[in-house]
Amino acid sequence: MAKRLLLGRPFRSDKLQHTLLPKRIALPVFASDALSSVAYAPDEILLTLSIAGAAAYVFSPWVTLAVAVVMVTVVASYRQTVHAYPSGGGDYEVATVNLGPRAGLSVASALLVDYILTVAVSISSGVSNLGSVIPWVAEHKVIIAIIAIVLLSSLNLRGLRESGAAFAVPTYLFIVVIVGMILTGLVRVFILGEDLRAPSAGLTIVPEEDPISQAMFAFILLRTFSSGCAALTGVEAISNGVPAFKKPKSKNAATTLLLLGGLSIVMLYGIVLLAQATHLKFVENPMLQIVPNAASEGYVQKTVTTQLAETVFGDGSMLLYLVGAVTALILFLAANTAFNGFPVLGSILAQDRYLPRQLHNRGDRLAFSNGILFLAVAAIVLIVAFEAEVTKLIQLYIVGVFVSFTLSQAGMIRHWNRLLRTQRDPVRRGRMIRSRAINAFGMCLTGAVLIVVLITKFLLGAWIAIAAMIVIYGLMVAIHRHYTRVAEELRPTDERPVLPSRNHAIVLVSKVHQPTLRALAYAQATRPDTLTAVTVNVDDNDTRAIQAEWERRQIPVSLTVIDSPYREITRPILDFVKNTRRASPRDVVTVFVPEYVVGRWWENLLHNQSALRIKGRLLFENGVMVTSVPWQLRSSQDRDLDRLDRVLSRAPARGPRSHGTDDPGDSDPS
């Protein structure tokens, strides 16, 4: 009932087409990450420049312009990708098809890490923006970040369309509010001539290192540029999510990319320009960089967006709280880009046998539930480890996405070269040559940005992301090797299977009761060549009682007693089974395990697990078959089996529905 309330009723598989998205819904679903980056990318640009002192803020528009150029190039490049590869593989498919499996796995590992970081950074930034307006939130930001991830996961588990509808209103509201704030501020400053000054305008800041050499300043500019490039994360999500668009899929995805790029550039550049016009200051370390004076007394550094809203709309105004609320909300929802991209990519990798197959399964609501849950857990681990600090997490960010950008564009160049070898139509060749030129320029530019990111961020935390990519790459190779080896072993041969010479049946006995008698009867019904009942002597009195009852009932099956001086059950039974089969390797031994079924979970705690241990150990013996013979107790008849069937049908089978008791037939191991 609780699951139905949170997730809704299950969808039939034939309803999958109804979860496809129109452009107006696809934009908030897939573009919220890139759009929301305007809430933390300007912070990172100003924060990094502050290392060189307040005078360095003059370079902020130029750094932002460089980021915008990269954004335009990447958007133009991915518009070629969504037309050429509309299947949803995105960068992974492009790199695999054109550069080989190793390049594809490199891209996949980079994207998986980047998706996890997208959730962690977006949620942490959302909490920081909300904390700028509501101080209580800043005091409990880790807990609130975790709650936000849990709620976001629940929305996505309900299904793609419902998630998109839920995110559309706040996303569009964020765009309207931010653009409105930028236009209002710029009009008041440049047209009406008002002297708008941010709350931090009166602060005096000093560089962290004084004096700063030209080489150091150049390095700071490069680091600022690499931090500002966080605005590009999420662009690749559309190429991975093309199958989720309504038809024509490629055209709609390309249009959404264009809208994403245009809106992101306008908002990012507008915020940086307005921050410079209002003399806003944002530093990396307020305790060290802000010079104590009257303006700094009691000063608490707020985010850039919150400071601008306070400057434009006034302290305590409703619009200020609206900006803070929608900014925090869009940052929470920005993680939805990863919640849509990560499961789809995980499903593709699972289908290619590079990740566990469970990631390829759809849940009740036709969402890739296992991928959503895995992403949520991984992001929560990062948030707890880095205490939801955006400045710490941002150093790990964007490495993966620029690895995928660069390899994807290299793959697209090969794609166009391959098509140009056979294409003779002049019009189509012209389009292909133009597309190749766009992808070539994109590869050069994103490759250069990747080098800058590695140089400027490696020691600051980027090495952690690189190490994670290497680990995931190795893990995927190992998983693929395992699946390949298993498939090879299971492949049928041309030889006809050899029938066993004889079947030896062994019934395990702990007491002479109903489960044991049923197991004996069933074993006799299979008509084995030999039938033996076996009990382990761990207590002389109990064993003599079993033998006496056996004779009194005149059971027509020989009872074999195995001595166990050390009161062990599993090892003596294994030795007996091995000796039985060792006499003739072509023989088969079938072990019948009588066990009763309880209906309540706590009843299982009252019995040991000898039967499960014996069965689990016998599974590794060649030529040995294990058969469970259940006896249902009254408590099991009250079990809601229909509900249990629904639960089991949603997950890979892990064994029989009944729970084995502690030993063959009873709680007593004797």
Image (cartoon, grey):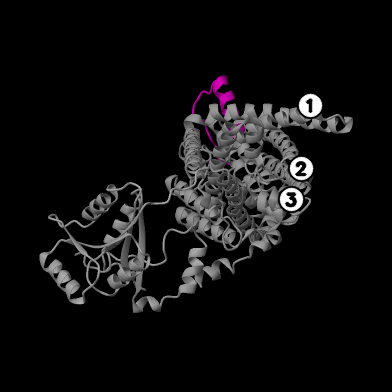
Dot 2: within a 10 Å radius of its alpha carbon, few (fewer than 14), some, or many (20 or more) residues?
Answer: few
Q: Are marks 3 and 1 in contact (CB under 8 Å)?
A: no
Q: Are marks 3 and 2 in contact (CB under 8 Å)?
A: no
Residue 615 point in image, percent of width and height: 32, 57
Residue 190: image tag: 2
Q: Are marks 1 and 2 in contact (CB under 8 Å)?
A: no
Dot 3: within a 10 Å radius of its alpha carbon, few (fewer than 14), some, or many (20 or more) residues?
Answer: some
Q: Estimate the spatial distance between the alpha carbons at disc 3 and disc 1, rounded to whole Å.
A: 54 Å
Residue 256 point in image, percent of width and height: 74, 48
Q: Amino acid at mark 2?
A: Phe
Q: Nearer the viewer, residue 510 or 239?
A: 510
Q: Nearer the viewer, residue 553 or 616?
A: 553
Dot 1: within a 10 Å radius of its alpha carbon, few (fewer than 14), some, or many (20 or more) residues?
Answer: few
Residue 184: image tag: 3
Question: Which corner quadrant of the image does residue 368 belong to?
Answer: bottom right
> Which residue was labeled with disc 1?
421
Residue 164 point in image, percent of width and height: 66, 58
User: Upstream in the sequence, badge 1 or badge 2?
Assistant: 2
Q: Is residue 534 magenta?
A: no
Q: Is residue 630 above or below residue 336?
A: below
